[in-house]
Image (cartoon, rainbow, N blue to C red):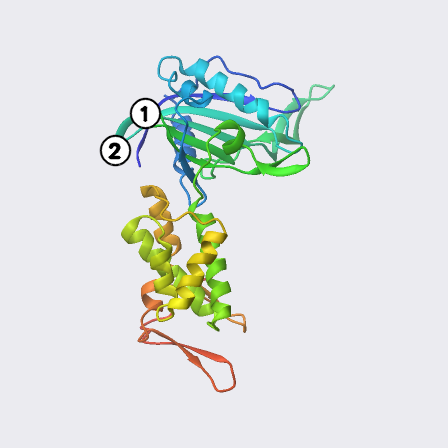
Amino acid sequence: MEIRLKQAILHVVDRKLGDPVISQVGLDLTNTYIRDYLTKKIEKLSSEKVKTGTLIPTSPLAELIKTGKQDFTNMSQQMVEKWYEIYQTSEDAPSADVFVVLYEQEQNVTLHTAFLKVNYHQGYTHLVSANDEGLLANELIVHKSILAGKTQKADEGFQINNEDLSYELEEKKYTFSGDRQFYLSTKVIESEPLPSLEENVKVVAKAAKKIGNKFDVPDREIVASVKEAIQENVTEHSSLDTQQIAQKVFKDNPAAQTDFQATVVEKGYVDKVPMSTEVKQIATKKYGKQKLKLSNGIELIVPLDVYQDPNLIEFINNPDGTISVTIKNVEDVISRL
């Protein structure tokens, strides 16, 4: 997706200083490095970890978002202040800088609002100073408020479609009154999101292994079938359908299919959660390969179409209980450092 930045502002949340340092002036978007930094951070909000949902139209955050086009600076200030009321009650939530950004996407002129929290990291830099004798001294110092580079994703954040109030969110757990918990969805956005692709895949994988063990299906075969099913679901339907996954993983076993679907429901699985184009692209790439680690230390990364072709790779169960892996019809082997 191509992003057109409209306005952006940076607010400093150094918890050692107390209340946030709220900026009254937006960032200069004529600076290329600022545009690049913010654009990359917004793009990287879309991942297999992102949760999706829609704000309640009458919620405080939804009402605030609606004012962004007319008074962006004030909107961003109120958003950060609302967020910080919750954030400051955590025992271990770190200091950070918060970027609030108003932008449009290339394929959709609808305005979006992004909230990006980038935690501080400790780094080293130099300091040029003069000693008592007037001599220049180059020193090495520790800087405790370094931000992650533009290629790294924000530690937490969300992006909201200003028109239909749909959102994508990635959050972390922090400790509140001794209990580690999510807070962005429950206390800031106040809208229960659908589970992320990553969360759904974990439920599917655990359930498939459990049922596979019950019916004596090797884990290797289960994992391979699950990945294949996920790949097909994502490519064809842009969502995960447990019925189709069950049929793919447990082809000729209706009892296993029924048990699998019952198990994922027990684990809280939400079926057919839609995913954005960006998440679909990430998932297609991630689940398009089988990663194998053999007991003798050999590790293989095999494209899914190769894994499915017995003319290219074959797994042979030996009489002594071991497994032989045969890689076939290889034209060349390239060795890399």
Residue positioned most to the right: 132
Disc 2: which residue: 107
Comes first in the chain, label 2 or label 1: 2
Q: Nearer the viewer, residue 262 or 291?
A: 262
Residue positioned most to the bottom: 319
Q: Nearer the viewer, residue 95 or 219?
A: 219
Can residue 290 be seen at all in this image of the molecule? no
Residue type at mark 2: give it.
Gln
Residue type at mark 1: give it.
Glu
Mark 2 residue element: loop
Question: Which of the 4 image quadrants contains residue 231?
Answer: bottom left
Quarter placement of the N terminus: top left
Can residue 331 be seen at all in this image of the molecule? yes
- Badge 2: how crowded within 10 Å, few (<14), some, or many (20+)? few
Residue 15 placement, left or right of 43 = right
* Residue 113, image x, y percentages: 39, 26
As drawn, 329 above or below 52: below
Mark 1 residue element: loop
- Residue at x-position 48% and y-position 59%: 207
* Residue 229, image x, y percentages: 36, 59
* Residue 187, image x, y percentages: 53, 29
Q: Can you tell which of label 2 and label 1 is closer to the viewer?
A: 1
As drawn, 118 above or below 51: above
- Residue at x-position 47% and y-position 79%: 323
C-alpha separation, residue under disc 2 versus residue under disc 1: 15 Å
Disc 1: which residue: 163
* Residue 43, image x, y percentages: 38, 36
